[in-house]
Image: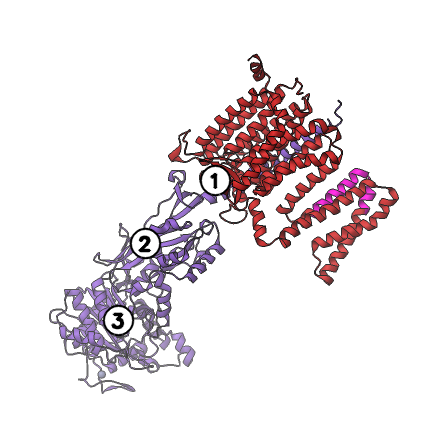
Amino acid sequence: MKDSFINRKYVIMVLIVLASLVLLIRLFIIQVVKSSYRLSADNNVLRYVTQYPARGLISDRNGKLIVYNQAAYDLMVVPAQTTKFDTTGFCDLLGISSDLLRKQMRIAINYSRRAPSVFLKQVSNETYAKFQEKMFMYPGFYVQPRTLRKYSKPVAAHVLGYVSEVDDGITRKDPYYKSGDYIGKSGIEEAYEKELRGRRGVKIFLVDVYSRIKGSYEDGKKDTLAIQGTNISSSIDLDLQEYGELLMKNKRGSIVAIEPKTGEVLTLVSSPNYDPALLVGRIRSDNYALLSADTLKPLFNRALMASYPPGSTFKPINGLIGLQEGVITPSTLFACHNGYLFIACHSHSSPLSLVGAIGTSCNAYFCQTYRKVLENPYYNTISDAYDKWKGYLNEFGFSNKLGTDFVNELTGFIPTSEYFNKYYGKNRWKALTVISMAIGQGEVGATPLQMANMTAAIANRGYYFTPHIIKSVGSDHTIDKRFITKHQISIDSANFESIVLGMEASVNSGGTSTVAAMKDIIVCGKTGTAQNPHGKNHAVFIAFAPKENPKIAIAVYVENAGFGATYAAPIASLLIEKYLKGVVSNKVREQSMLNLNLMH
Amino acid sequence: MDRSNNIWNRIDKISLILFLLLIVMGWVNIYAAVYNEEHSGLLDMSQRYGKQFIWIAASLVIAIFIVIIDNRFYFFFSWFIYGACMLLLILVIIVGKEINGAKSWFELGGFSLQPSEMAKFGTALALAGYLNTKRQELTQFSVILPASAIILFPALLTALQPDMGSSIVYFSLFIVLFREGMSPYIFFSGLLMAVLFFLTLLTNNLYLTIALIGISVFLVWFATRKWKLVFLGTVIFVFIAVILYLLDHYVFKSIGNELVIFISLILSGIVYAIYIYNKRAVSVLIIYLFLVCSTIFINSVDYTFNNFLPTHQKDRINILLGLKSDPHGTGYNVNQSIISIGSGGFHGKGFLQGTQTKFKFVPKQSSDFIFCTIGEEWGFLGSGIVIGIYLFLLLRLIKLAERQRSDFSRIYGYSVVSILFTHIFLNIGMAIGLVPVIGIPLPFLSYGGSSLWGFTILLFIFLRLDASRTEYLI
Ligand SMILES: [Zn+2]
């Protein structure tokens, strides 16, 4: 029986060998040639869970906590790992609409099916507790702990600023930030972002196909811990801040109080303001839109960003310059006949010396002083004399940014001689052309912060430290060098004494500021009225106390309140007393200020 | 007594060792595939590796019985066994337990049996029994048809369960018919159709058509060795195709690339026909017909699948192709399977170190996708060794088959080779994305009593026949 088909065994053998070769070649390609599968397997099984650090805490100058953290939870989803689930129950549990569920799922799927995305941000503790019990029913979902800001009192919103999530612009500019991170957006939160933010950590987990965590990767050797943000002590006095905001309720304006010896800002009020808790968590964006749209501009920080003509509170500095330039002496007398040329004055005894002129806020006296400063024969041209005058102002921090720790700060405005040369022709202007600046009107503009700083410099009799909102950073109490650098003003301290006497007289010897007087503390102050072309003038008052070894320098602005003595001075005196004594004795004055409503 | 001692000496030791090696490797990998820390005991009966241990022990007992039984039993009872198997296949459709939409299992008090695994050796025996006397006439349809019926009857019954994977395996027995004398044209066109069918489901049929044209051009050159002819044919085809494509692109806009190629093929064929007629180039004609038929075939498979089948039937085919158990959408199984194997690299991640395996990313990993565990934990090295062992076993079995004195034993031997080969190729091919997902086990390695026993019986009947190869069966 000859087998005529015996050679066909070779065909079959070749077939089998070829098939095995096909398998081996394919295996070689996917196992040895391509390395991407290793990555895919890792992506399957490794879940990188960012460990978000808690932001640093912020306390006041006395160690009272102002800002701390509360737990919140971001609900995350890995779309590929979800299974069909009871959507109604899910929505009820989280208190969301089914539309939102669908929308968020779509966004997550568009981002990546395998990588986690945020499904619902900042779920509250209570919702989280409810959800956690049922989480096993919703594979693919898990929570990521976060922290949100919490405020011990609804105050100091402008000082503290707020925190928001980074947007694409930020992540593109600064590689540190990843989508989902938080960043300080104004105030201390922005200025000290680097210190407050801490450092992210990452935990690597192994997850199974149902996205259940099965353990840590390589026993956690590759994990990094989150490092909590540095705690910060603010220079703010929380009680004083709260009291200041209370007094400014229903008024537009601002208060800046500085400790003259250090430049530390004790209180910084901008009114109207808002509860900082409004800009936290999921309600933030809605509230932010509401606050932005508010015609009262509660987000606007007047203390740093509003420029007013200083009015009569500018007189002390003009007096100082007159003394330093030698065009007047403390005993120089100027007559006042209800004004000087076209600038009117109220009725008072005449003639007056410098102290009396500050006390009664005589316009004629300072116009004549200013004229002497600008017409000083020592200088060849009016431009030179004017530049000298402006140089002193610059030393006080006018028409410049003071360099505080706030990121946004207005420079204010003092015109240069160039400005007038351009306007009137080179040196074709006279002292009388710009005479309104003698009494703080006209082209001059300064922020409340600059005025408070000037007051501090007067209180110190000739120097100041750059105002700052931070007392110290971290446990080793560091602070930026620029805040401990003394700014000495090139005016003799003896000249300051004359001005201080004038400001003392203003409050205590029947001057314009007597409403600010206190029994046992010598307050030195000066009223002012900032001209307002859009309506009723703004009331301004600057003061420091006590006269010797001053502890507080303050500038108070109340918009549309008219004469400075009426509203600004009482508020300042209440704050001074509160700060120096801890209690307020003049309850009648306090009550009338609290009740005052200037917003209609 | 004397005789049964002898029989163990005459059993092919190489095949026996390879068999033992495979079941041990199978058990180790099943252990890895279902491993969890709470049940790490080797013989924990609540776990699959514990159960597989029992299946292995039982399969060894079965193997011993098969060897002890007289070799003539299998010859004389081949039809009886086939009949019994067919009865079981019919019965399972009626009273079988439905799992995943298929009635493939008998369940008898916690113990399940899959008759399709047993029917394979029954069919092999019947085929050997039938062809034992008829093999000289396998060139005639009067023999091919009954032989085909023996093969296709269980295939049909299995398809009715429906278990497409197991059904496809029966077709591999045509390899045996080919070996025994069936026309190679029938065999190779069948093989080609099978390959084209899988490729159509796996890839874009435009590329497939283009690849086929390339192959045909090569074949024409191979058959005639005439560069001029090849060049001429190619130029004519490309010329017509470009014109048609431009016409479609700018004028008709509705023909579609597949049809453009097909029409070009027909038109260039007409131009070509003169040449073929003048030169009596029969081989070229055959190649041309092959090309046209394949193109029609792949386009009609694709077209039928996409256009004629209602959605639920399409889903049904997807289910049959094993895409149904996808928890995460089409292609998930294969993707994860390829990721598992691909991530193993050259050396593999090591025993119990495969993350894909450990965290259950591949469904059915201990049964149909056991090769993933091998690929991930033992790498290219381990995969290569497994394929090498299989290849060695298959070639060894061919060698044994060819040394048989009786046609019955040789035909049975080739049946064993064909069935094992098909299982191995399709299973591994499926795991690495070469063939569609077909739910069939990897012989001796996959978890499951029925399949392990089925393969053991299949193999050991042949080893038993081989042990007595010097004896005449009748
Ligand atoms: Zn006067």
Residue hosting label 2: A130
Q: What letter labels the chain drawn in purple?
A: A
Q: Is residue A407 visible?
A: no
Q: Which amino acid, by three-letter code, is at mark 3?
A: Gln
Residue hosting label 1: B356
Q: What letter labels the chain drawn in red?
A: B
Q: Residues within 10 Å of mark 2 (few under 14, many from 20)?
A: few
Q: Residues within 10 Å of mark 3 (few under 14, many from 20)?
A: many
**Which residue is rendered at x = 41% and y = 77% of the image?**
A421
Q: Is residue B223 magenta?
A: yes
Residue hosting label 3: A324
Q: How many marks?
A: 3
Q: Which-is-in-front pick, marks 3 and 2?
A: 2
- The local secondary structure at tag 3 comes to helix
- The local secondary structure at tag 1 comes to helix
For residue B350, side relative to residue B208 (left or right):
left
State the residue lying farthest toward the right: B278
- Give the distance between the C-alpha atoms of the residues marked 1 and 2, in whole angstroms: 33 Å
Q: Which amino acid, by three-letter code, is at mark 1?
A: Gln
* Magenta segment main secondary structure: helix
In which quadrant is the C terminus of chain A drawn?
A: bottom left
Query: On what subunit does the disc labeled 2 rest?
Result: A
The colour scheme used to paint the residues is by chain
In this rendered view, identify the residue nearer to me: B52 or A467. Answer: B52
Ligand 1 lies in which image quarter?
A: bottom left
